[in-house]
Image (cartoon, rainbow, N blue to C red):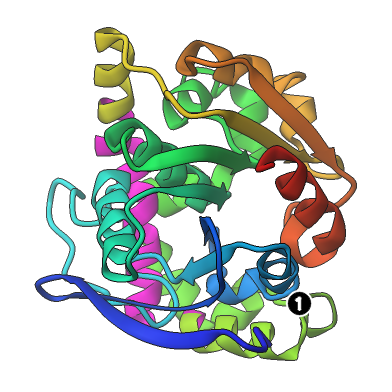
Amino acid sequence: MFEGFTEWDIEVSPGITLHGRSGGSGPALVLLHGHPRTHATWHRVAPVLAAQGRTIVCPDLRGYGRSSKPEPDAEHRVYADRAMAGDVVELMAALGHREFAVVGHDRGAYVAYRTALDHPDRVSALAVCDGVPILEALERADARFAAKWWHWFFYGSSPHAERVITADPLAWYRPDVVSMGGANYKDMVEAVTDPLTVRAMLEDYRAGLTVDRANDEADREAGRRIQAPVLVMWSWRDDMGELYVDPAAIWEPWCEQPVRQAVVQSGHHMAEEAPDQVAEFLADFLI
């Protein structure tokens, strides 16, 4: 897995160390995973992009995988997308990259667009996979959304979520070693069977329903827009099309430049299920 890449643990701020891998040379590209995955979800995509002449950086987000899992705070700011975006910027600086493109899937998509909004001078291009801005999702959260995405509210609001998940994490998440690949599966299993990882992942969702939403509201009211080129990718066999019809159209008011879109012929975990197509769409976008 990640042949030719370097594995590292890098301190990005006092008490916060990110684990991950990087490889290749050329313009920098950060790949951010979603819930409940780790950076290893990109193991079939990252080497392809590196071979095309890019430096690929794949970190575990704060709280996920083998990255630091700080104590939560009452306002959920410790696990807010803004804090995680700051981690990404500091990580890239530590690796010697002032400017970089960023790709995020699922929860990583929220960190990716927050990085682009908060640090426009650092982000050269943004790709979001299977996601719309958190504020837009919550404002459209009707009964159909709640039935399909009930986990958002269970993770973000229920006092029982941590106890239920930690009782049997593998029964809860049901990882599939065949589709994921052995090393990727092992990395995820090690993560989700750590109660501190589960606590951190739930804090990510709690931040999403509170401080992350508030930050989106403030940005929209202030008229802040993403300055970098944007690609919206979504999975054909997931429910993004059913819920939003045209996810790219939802992103347009948030973006200064015209939004491109690509539909991946896969289920939700596109980097694992359709890595060649994901790599192709990203390479075409980043030319």
Please tell me which residue is depicted at 51% across the width and 89% down the height of the picture.
190
Please tell me which residue is depicted at 49% across the width and 52% down the height of the picture.
108
Viewer-closest of 182 and 97: 97
Please tell me which residue is depicted at 33% across the width and 25% down the height of the picture.
216
Q: Which quadrant holds the N terminus?
A: bottom right
- Is residue 115 left or right of 145 when viewed as pictured? left
How many neighbours does mark 1 have within 10 angstroms: few (below 14), some (14-19), or many (20 or more)? many
Provide residue 272's location: percent of width, then percent of height.
77, 67
State the residue position of label 1: 180
Residue 62 lies in quadrant: bottom left
- Given the image, on which type of amino acid does mark 1 rest? Met
Q: Is residue 67 above or below residue 273?
A: below
- Is residue 212 left or right of 45 when viewed as pictured? left
Element type at mark 1: helix
- Is residue 85 left or right of 7 when viewed as pictured? left
- Residue 212 is a magenta residue: yes
Please tell me which residue is depicted at 26% across the width and 74% down the height of the picture.
69
Residue 194 seen from this side: no
Residue range highlighted in magenta = 192-214
Viewer-closest of 268 and 231: 231
Viewer-closest of 64 and 45: 45
- Residue 146 is a magenta residue: no
Q: Is residue 209 above or below residue 181?
A: above
Provide residue 191's location: percent of width, then percent of height.
48, 82
Q: Is residue 31 above or below residue 199?
A: above
Extreme residue toward the right, this view: 265
The secondary structure that most of the magenta stretch takes on is helix
Residue 68 seen from this side: yes
Q: Which quadrant holds the C terminus?
A: top right
Q: Is residue 171 above or below residue 99?
A: below
